[in-house]
Image (cartoon, helix red, strand yellow):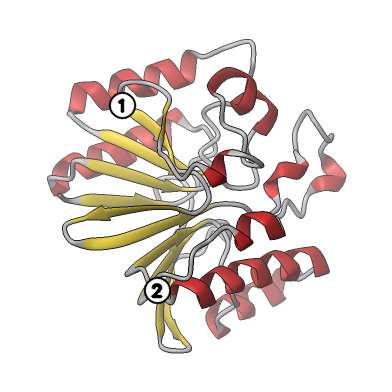
Amino acid sequence: MKVLLAGDQHGSLQDTTMVLEYAVTLGAELVIVLGDFGFVWDPSSTYDFDHLTRELKERGLKLWWLDGNHENFDHLRAAYGIDVDKTFATLNTIPMSETISYLPRGHTFVLDQMTFMAFGGAVSVDKQWRIEGESWWPQELITDEQVDAVPELPVDVLLSHDIHTLSPILHGELMKLDWKLDALSNHNRHQVDRVVAKVTPKAIFHGHYHKRYADKIDGIRVYGLNCGAR
């Protein structure tokens, strides 16, 4: 099965439709969004989510996604039963429509004889411009309980929103902005590092930093993805 990995979509129909078109040109059957999916944001409207469901169906595609920090976690729980403080223990993919499914933190799956683990979560460093419970939610953080539930079994690929440690490439970019270098962001990266130590992936693909790059850290191939259709 051909799979296209995509970075943060932030609920943009325009960008995500471009990603779907690219997936079709590649002959992909599945698109996996690595956090900040953002299509379940406004409790008063499902227009964008329903439209995306149809766009996927028309192209013969499925979409899976793991959570980032910019998700409406309260609405996800109320509308779809996605509670990141509980669903991580079930480790089952959660269908949301006929073409869209959520990947819980710690969910493991196999594609073409390769084992993958999905693990979302990150820190919103722009909280001072947001409102808790309206535009940011504390469930974004990776908890000790979620990490402790991860079995010590190797996987081939870890799909995450955050990364376990900053590569020199990424660190240099963040230093220019003084962005995501705060103590809470460092702690969340440490949580991802604990996951990495348990599952020892050969490769990691992540979003969150809106920076496309490739590097090798402690023998692990690491790939950061840009946002939208970039």
Spot the residue most to the top: 44
Which quadrant holds residue 192? bottom right
Q: Residue tagged by mark 1?
A: 99
Amino acid type indicated by mark 1: Thr
Q: Amino acid at mark 2?
A: Pro
Q: Please report the residue visible at 49 percent of the width from the left and 54 percent of the height from the top.
A: 106
Using the numbered discs, state the Cα–Cα distance from disc 2 to disc 1 in whole angstroms: 28 Å
Residue drawn where x is 36% and y is 68% of the image:
155
Residue 163 at x, y = what percent? 56, 68
User: In the rendered image of this protein, does residue 40 appear above or below residue 201?
Assistant: above
Nearest the eye: 131 or 174:
131
Seen from the viewer's position, the closer of residues 1 and 213 is 1
| Residue at 40% over, 74% down | 201
Residue receiving disc 2: 201
Question: Along the horizontal axis of the image, is 29 left or right of 188?
Answer: left
| Res 61 label | none
Residue drawn at x 51%, y 39% is 37
Q: Position of residue 34 (x, y in %)?
A: 46, 51
Q: Position of residue 165 (x, y in %)?
A: 60, 77
The quarter holding residue 43 reads: top right
**One can see residue 95 in this view:** yes
Instruction: Choose between 155 and 15: the one closer to the eye.
Output: 155
Q: Residues within 10 Å of mark 1 (few under 14, many from 20)?
A: some
Q: Earlier in the sequence, mark 2 or mark 1?
A: 1
Tell me the element at label 2. loop
Say which of marks 2 and 1 sits in front: 2
Label 2: how many Cα within 10 Å (few below 14, some 14–19, many 20+): many
Q: Mark 1 falls on what kind of element?
A: loop
